Image: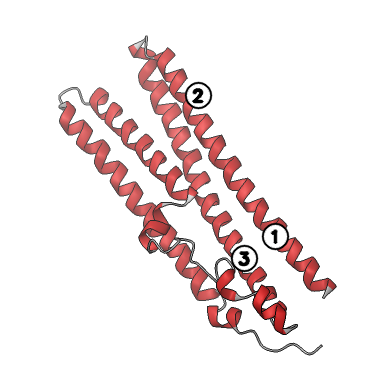
Amino acid sequence: MTALTTEHFVLQTAASATVSEAAGRSSLYVLSLSSSLVAIGFASRSRETLVPFLATVLSSVFVLGLFTVVRLVDTTLENMRCLIGIARIRGYYRTLTPEAAVYFAAEHGRWPEGHAPSLGLGPLVAFFTTSASVIAFINSIVAGVGVTLLASDLFIGVQNAVALGLGVATALVLMAAFVFYQRWRFRIFELAGPHKEHLLSPPAVPR
């Protein structure tokens, strides 16, 4: 029981660490983006300086966003893995006494014992409300804005509507690619992870 309690505490600490890391990485990206926008405002006074500055800054912010999104997906999966481990331990707690079966009932627990991460709003909402989805959405807009500005500047004959269309198309393609990537990573996690039934009805452990 001491070993299980220690493991429970370690898993809780690890789960909290993934949340803190996700918040820190998201804040770092947003601060980098906001600082870059302020710098672009100063550089906009000179057209000769603005174009290479945009190409350098926006591409750097976009790459930082890609790294951030990939890591945010990783931290989400690590958090889910910790919650699965906690659910497995809670399943053993339920076998200790009749009272324990009430206090540690699966329907009163969190995911994966009880409610899903989407809180009953459906898998589509779950995918689009993660921290990774938020950063990916902002990063897609950054890429779309960069393509629009560069297209309107490099190709003088291109109309603003065409340049805007290229930017919107870029943002939509990137967001669709992220959704596919996130679903693929979650699918691999689900196939490799334990079944929910094993968490709700764990095998009896000799005491």
Foreground label between 3 and 2 = 3
What's the distance in space between the residues labelled 1 and 3, CA to CA?
Answer: 8 Å
Q: Secondary structure at mark 1?
A: helix
Query: Residue 115, how many percent across, how many down?
Result: 50, 67
Foreground label between 1 and 2 = 1
- Residue topped by disc 2: 35
Q: Residue furthest right?
A: 2
Whichever of labels 1 and 2 marks the residue nearer the N terminus, that label is 1
User: Which residue is painted at 26% across and 25% down in the image?
Assistant: 154
* Residue 66 left/right relative to 146: right
Observer-nearest of 135 and 1: 1
Q: Secondary structure at mark 2?
A: helix
What's the distance in space between the residues labelled 3 and 2, CA to CA?
Answer: 36 Å
How many callouts does the rendering have? 3
Q: Please identify the quadrant where the C terminus is shown.
A: bottom right
How packed mark 1 is, by other alpha carbons closer than 10 Å (few <14, some 14-19, many 20 or more), is: some
How packed mark 2 is, by other alpha carbons closer than 10 Å (few <14, some 14-19, many 20 or more), is: few
- Residue 105 vs 59, above or below: the answer is below
Based on the displayed image, in which of its 4 quarters is residue 167 positioned? top left
Q: Are marks 1 and 2 in contact (CB under 8 Å)?
A: no
What's the distance in space between the residues labelled 1 and 2, CA to CA?
Answer: 35 Å
The amino acid type found where label 3 is placed reads Leu
How packed mark 3 is, by other alpha carbons closer than 10 Å (few <14, some 14-19, many 20 or more), is: many
- Residue topped by disc 1: 12
Q: Please identify the quadrant where the N terminus is shown.
A: bottom right
The amino acid type found where label 1 is placed reads Gln
- Residue topped by disc 3: 83
Query: Residue 43, how many percent across, how many down?
Result: 41, 14
Query: Residue 95, how many percent across, how many down?
Result: 71, 84
Whichever of labels 1 and 3 marks the residue nearer the N terminus, that label is 1
